[in-house]
Amino acid sequence: QVQLQESGPGLVKPSQTLSLTCTVSGVSISSGTYYWTWIRQPAGEGLEWIGRIFKSGTTNYNPSLKSRVTISVDTSKNQFSLKLTSVTAADTAVYYCARDGIGGSYDYWGQGTLVTVSS
Amino acid sequence: DIQMTQSPSSVSASVGDRVTITCRASQDISSWLAWYQQKPGKAPKLLIYAASSLQSGAPSRFSGSGSGTDFTLTVSSLQPEDFATYYCQQAYIFPLTFGGGTKVEIK
């Protein structure tokens, strides 16, 4: 079955770059017709859509983060990645990767990874 | 950005109750709406897509309705495993946005 797994540092210093990778199993990014997405959730708060990528490298970003976000894909490793630059404490959150399913919904999610921005 | 407003923000209910959660979009989103269930420490789980289509594996006691700007999620008979937070999400236009959540608690 389809599984997603986030990985990356759990602690990032202010002004540095947050880097996360999502490893996909059970489906090939390169053979499918899905977009692959990053979503985050600060503790006790709601969900924020960060952006998405297609196998071709086509991306869409949340304008509120666009100047700091890059999402990339490595089809040879069946992975996609998130980079968020110039982080502050406001970027502390659980970060999820997910697959775009039918009608723009998210049918498969990773378990989430907590990233804390602190010196 | 399209604002998604859920109500109530929390509801207390008993096992067997019928529970209805509403979600209002700040502009017409047709049927581009999904509903999720999230339990503490877990990722959201898709329940409903395209406003009223039940996701494979989701219990049939969950149903969704609405189009345009007003949507509802109904749980026909609340079960112990349904106590959780529920979110709506619009998929009509970027940036995709979520409602603030509705926490369903045990009465």
Image (cartoon, rainbow, N blue to C red):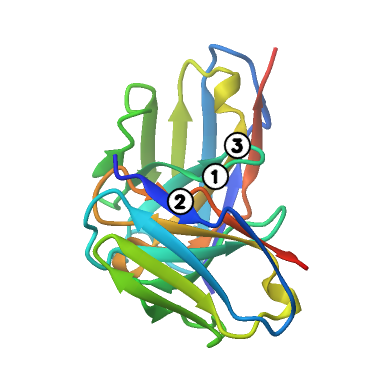
Which residue in the protein does label 1 denote?
A46
Label 2 close to label 1 by CB (< 8 Å) = yes
Residue type beneath disc 2: Gly
Where residue A42 is drawn, which disc sits there? 3
Q: Which residue is at 32% across, 72% downward?
A: B66
Where residue B70 is drawn, which disc sits there? none
Q: Secondary structure at mark 3?
A: loop
Q: Which residue is at 42% across, 70% downward?
A: B72
Q: Which of the chains bears the disc numbered 1?
A: A
Q: CA distance from mark 2 to mark 3?
A: 14 Å
Residue B93 visible, this angle: yes
Q: Which residue is at 30% across, 53% downward?
A: A55
Picture quadrant where residue B31 is located = bottom left
Nearest the viewer among B7 and A54 is B7
Q: CA distance from mark 2 to mark 1?
A: 7 Å
Q: Secondary structure at mark 2?
A: loop
Q: Which of the chains bears the disc numbered 2?
A: B
Residue A78 visible, this angle: no
Q: Is residue B25 above or below residue A86?
A: below
Residue B42 pos. (x, y %) = 67, 57
Residue type beneath disc 1: Gly
Say if labels 2 and 3 share a chain: no
Nearest the viewer among B60 and A78 is B60
Which residue in the protein does label 2 denote?
B99
**Quarter placement of the C terminus of chain A:** top right
In the picture, measured across the screen, residue B90 lies left or right of residue B45, that is left
